[in-house]
Amino acid sequence: MSEPQPDVGQAGRAAGRAAKNTAVRAAAELGGKFASLALFAVLAREQGPSGLGVFLFALAWCELSLTPVDMGFDRYFLRQIAADGAALERLFANVVFLKLARAVPVVAASWLLVLATGQDEATRAAIFLLTAGLLFESLAYTVTSAFNAFERGVLVATALLTQRLLAAGLGITVLLAGHGVVAVATTYATGAGVGLAVSLWLLATRIRWPGTSLSAGERRGLRSASFAYATQDLFSIGIARVDAVMIAALAGKAVVGIYGAAYRMLEATLFISSALAGAFAAMFTYLDEHSDPPIRAVFERAIKATLALLVPCGVALAVLAEPVLRASFGGGFEEGAPPLRVLAVVVVLLGVVRIAGSLVLSRGDPRAMARLFGIALAVNIALNALLIPPLEATGAALAMLATELLIAAGVLRLAARAVGRLGLRETAVAPLAAGAAMTAAAWPLRDELVAGLTGGMAAYVVVFVAVERLVNPDDLSYLVRLVRARLPSREAA
């Protein structure tokens, strides 16, 4: 006779969907991030800091210049479909039309500026090719926003892995064959194009084809309703990428390569916050204070999951900076250790900002987020101009840290207005205490990557479970019940 399965109710089913989508998206993001990191590692070893710097400068240029193409459409699109699935047919073609229409003048202006600023031939070619790749990615984001709205994490994972693995595999192949940065940019654009095609195919076959209905009235409404999201996107991309452009102008592209190596390690952890934000985005839209589960409880658990997963990443990058860079990029990149230690704190802050920002944009006034990010961008540019000349890559990292602290404080305040104040003791104590224990365990082994990680993570897990059992045993027992409910019975096994 099989044992009865624990009943986790509506809250358990919601948590189960979030857990499934987070796990699937995280696995795909992890695979994609490691593929991209492998590509950057081979590029660094084959082309050195200067070659890596050229590619990262071109990528930053394209991301900054193409920001007006997205203009917040995908965030608004996701929010509307999560609230009403019928909005897919009404909005999809209009979003794509607006993106393509805006791409024409934006790309023309970007390319003219490239020619006017006298960039070298390799940089120009890389920018031209990466522009095409990022346009393909922009259109693919619209499709994956629909996947997230319908809580179909498997589809997001499939499209993402296709694009990342293909681009990385082709890029590594051409590098090992003796080609350089321009060839890598070509493979990046190719992978993005195939990823877009796969996304569209999945949309048509696994959900439904949204049609090609165009409406001038819908486009006017899209432009108006997405403006606040667009402003925040513009400021957010500026914060993330303006440092590379300013380093190139103030310190040279070789320093961009050193800083870029450190920044790649930060970005290698973003799969966690991306997966969590994607899994919870729809829930943040349709849950409220009276639902089961209530929105505040879901948000608190999302923040706790973010801290629990990202604090050990930050500690590992801070304590083991030199061996991490050596293992990833080879010799010559140890100069990236000081900025990497600073950016290790940003790893955790970015995760909190993504989750809290997703909540605010799903429930609150997006104009408040736009104002916050506008102030943060101004602060970031001023700090970069002040700190890069004397401190080079470390100065840019310090500017990023100060900026993210400002954003995290502001966005948590906005989130508290939307759902109520967080229970910080129940949410943050266990991850932070476990992080301190991991630091103490890994520090004596800071020159040995494997030993440092193994000892540090063992200390983290033990302390996290012990503190969570004392501070918030309900969450721990809830997780155990949820896992048991998702496992087959002994008889079925």
Image (cartoon, rainbow, N blue to C red):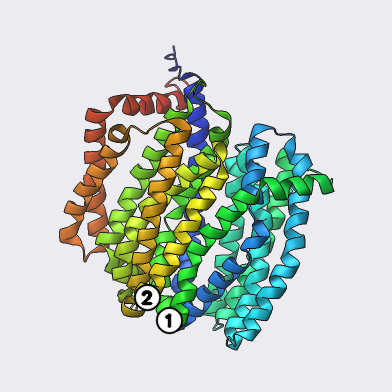
Q: For residue 367, which numbered disc appears in the image? A: none
Whole-percent x, y for residue 63 in the image: 58, 66
Q: Residues within 10 Å of mark 1 (few under 14, many from 20)?
A: some
Whole-percent x, y for residue 345 in the image: 32, 56
Q: In what quadrant of the picture does the N terminus appear?
A: top left
The residue depicted at 40 percent of the width and 34 percent of the height is 301
The residue depicted at 41 percent of the width and 66 percent of the height is 263
Q: Quadrant of residue 452?
A: bottom left
**What's under tag 2, amino acid-wise?**
Ile
Q: In terms of depth relative to the viewer, which is nearer, 382 or 275? A: 382
Helix, strand or loop status at disc 1: helix
- Residue, disc 2: 388
Q: In what quadrant of the picture does the C terminus appear?
A: top left
Marks 1/2: CA–CA distance: 7 Å
The answer to whether residue 125 is left or right of residue 245 is right
The numbered mark, 1 or 2, whose residue comes first in the sequence reads 1
Q: Is residue 29 above or below residue 336?
A: above
For residue 295, say whether it is visible.
Answer: yes
- Residue, disc 1: 250
**Is label 1 in contact with label 2 (beta carbons under 8 Å)?**
yes
Whole-percent x, y for residue 139 in the image: 69, 56
The answer to whether residue 475 is left or right of residue 463 is right
Whole-percent x, y for residue 446 in the image: 21, 63
Helix, strand or loop status at disc 2: helix
Q: Quadrant of residue 189?
A: bottom right
